[in-house]
Amino acid sequence: MKAGVLATGSVLVSAKIANAQEVIAFKLPDLGYPLDAMEPHIDATTMGIHHGKHHAAYITNLNTAVASSDDLKGKTIEALVGDLGAIKDAKLMATVRNNGGGHWNHTFFWDSLSPAARSGKPSDDLTAAINASFGSVVKMKEAFAVAAMTRFGSGWAWLIEKDGKLAITSTPNQDAPMMKGMVPDTEIGKPLLGVDVWEHAYYLKYQNKRADYVAAFWNVVDWSAVSKRLG
Ligand SMILES: [Fe+2]
């Protein structure tokens, strides 16, 4: 009888823990702007599917993976994707890499966008850093476009800060610039700006014309947000 009471108590405790974990599960962030805010450069239909379906799916898959491992529970998204080598189960690691990366990258992407009328320009400090590393903002944009165009298949192009300088890199799939041990050391750095070059990010409006999408992207970069990331 006593053992039965203990067993019941144990079940109740587990249920409370499970509920607590539901509370801290990763959630789809609000965009902070309407779906059509980036028109005509990024269309509302693409934004809606991209945010509401693709990003949401990464979060669902990530939460399932985290719930399956006591070692992963309670960690921030930065801790998860920044220390993927700590996940010894290869299949679980791959799931967190793809879906945790997908969650972080997309959150960062949404936070990097602003309607064209409020896009602004790089701060004086960021402009100076860009000029020092690339020669000019125009040359930085050219290098960024090359990275976006030469990323075969799906992935991202990045402007990163590394060792006091800025650099242009790209990563495959949902890899991100903070994934130490997963991406080459040359691609590790602090991301300042990233563009999603998965076809789901542009295909409805631009079809195969990735270059046109990347060129249009500059119209809706939130330079205030990007500039604040420097340093
Ligand atoms: Fe995406």
Image (tube, helix red, strand yellow):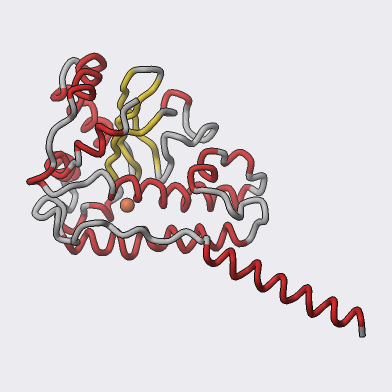
Percent across and percent down for residue 3 are 90, 79
* Quarter holding residue 10: bottom right
Q: Quadrant of the C terminus?
A: top left
Q: Is residue 179 above or below residue 25?
A: above
Q: Is residue 217 visible?
A: yes
The residue furthest bottom is 1
Q: Is residue 83 above or below residue 141?
A: below
Image check: 159 left or right of 33?
right
* Quarter holding residue 220: top left
Q: Quadrant of the N terminus?
A: bottom right
Q: Is residue 197 visible?
A: no
Residue occupying the point 24% across, 36% down: 149
Percent across and percent down for residue 37 are 14, 56
Residue occupying the point 18% across, 59% down: 204
Residue occupying the point 31% across, 28% down: 230
Percent across and percent down for residue 120 are 12, 37
Percent across and percent down for residue 67 are 60, 61
Image check: 54 left or right of 11?
left
**Front position in the image: 9 or 178:** 9
Residue occupying the point 49% across, 61% down: 61
Q: Is residue 98 above or below residue 68?
A: above
